[in-house]
Image (tube, rainbow, N blue to C red):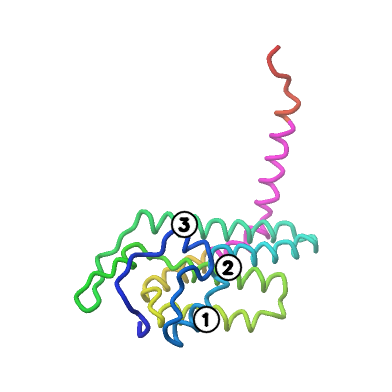
Amino acid sequence: MPGAHGVGPPPTLLESIVPLLHSDFGTPLLAVAETVTLPAQVALSGLLVAGACVALARRGRIEAAAAWVTAWLLATLIEVLCKGLLARPALHRHGLHVTAFDSSWPSGHTVRAAIVTAALATAWPRLRLPLALWVAAVAVLLEAAGFHTPSDVLGGLLLAALLVAGAPAAERSGVLRRGAAAARAARTRTRATPGPR
């Protein structure tokens, strides 16, 4: 982690949501890392996945669109739960406790970058190579800039592998279509059932 610096606390919720809020561009490595990883930030990645899903839905691939939205939501939920429930042993740098890494597993940027890559590649297959290069750069820069430990990035990649493999499987299985049909049927039954008089 050559770019690691400081021993500050983890980012606040607001810093996690607002792109580049309080970002440090102190070195060229940090500036490149902040810029390259920006699309994997929560709000921007959500917009990119939503754009891919709109394109897929317009082509009649409703199940694919639902699968990628579900993958992004699950990734975010699992990341928040893991970071809230799991704590690693304290990491130290120059004898000081680096509190920012106490609850940093898995790397949400890594998971979201992979889901953005897969969703955009599903919508626009000709972008597969540049997207693959981008997600690889994100994984390397998150570690090199000191934003995440290697185990955080690896955890993010493993979670991403499960979700990215699961989205096309869910599309092919029709489970999302059946779930939506069941929900519509339940709403119809609720509306049709007369209330107490």
Residue shown at 68% from the left, 14% from the top:
196
Residue shown at 22% from the left, 72% from the top:
96
The image quarter containing residue 182 is top right
Q: Which residues are magenta?
A: 163-188
Residue farthest along the left direction in this orientation = 95
Residue shown at 62% from the left, 79% from the top:
131
Q: Amino acid at mark 3?
A: Ile
Residue farthest along the bottom direction in this orientation = 28
Residue farthest along the right direction in this orientation = 59
Kindly check if marks 3 and 2 are in contact, taking CB atoms under 8 A apart as contact. no
Q: Determine the CA span between mark 1 and mark 2.
A: 13 Å
Local crowd size for mark 1, using a 10 Å CA cut-off: few (<14), some (14–19), many (≥20) = some
Q: Determine whether the residue tagged by mark 3 lies in a helix, strand or loop.
A: helix
Residue farthest along the top direction in this orientation = 197
Q: Amino acid at mark 1?
A: Ala
Q: Amino acid at mark 2?
A: Ile
On the image, the x and y values in percent for residue 112 come to 54, 67
Q: Determine whether the residue tagged by mark 1 lies in a helix, strand or loop.
A: helix
> Would you say 167 lies left or right of 78 here?
right
Mark 2 lies on residue: 115
The image quarter containing residue 185 is top right
The image quarter containing residue 169 is bottom right
Task: Mark 3 or mark 2: name the one nearer the start of the chain.
Answer: 3
Q: Which mark is residue 136?
A: 1
Is residue 160 inside the magenta stretch?
Answer: no
Q: Main secondary structure of the magenta part?
A: helix
Mark 3 lies on residue: 78
Of residues 112 and 158, the one nearer the viewer is 112
Of residues 104 and 10, the one nearer the viewer is 10
Local crowd size for mark 3, using a 10 Å CA cut-off: few (<14), some (14–19), many (≥20) = some
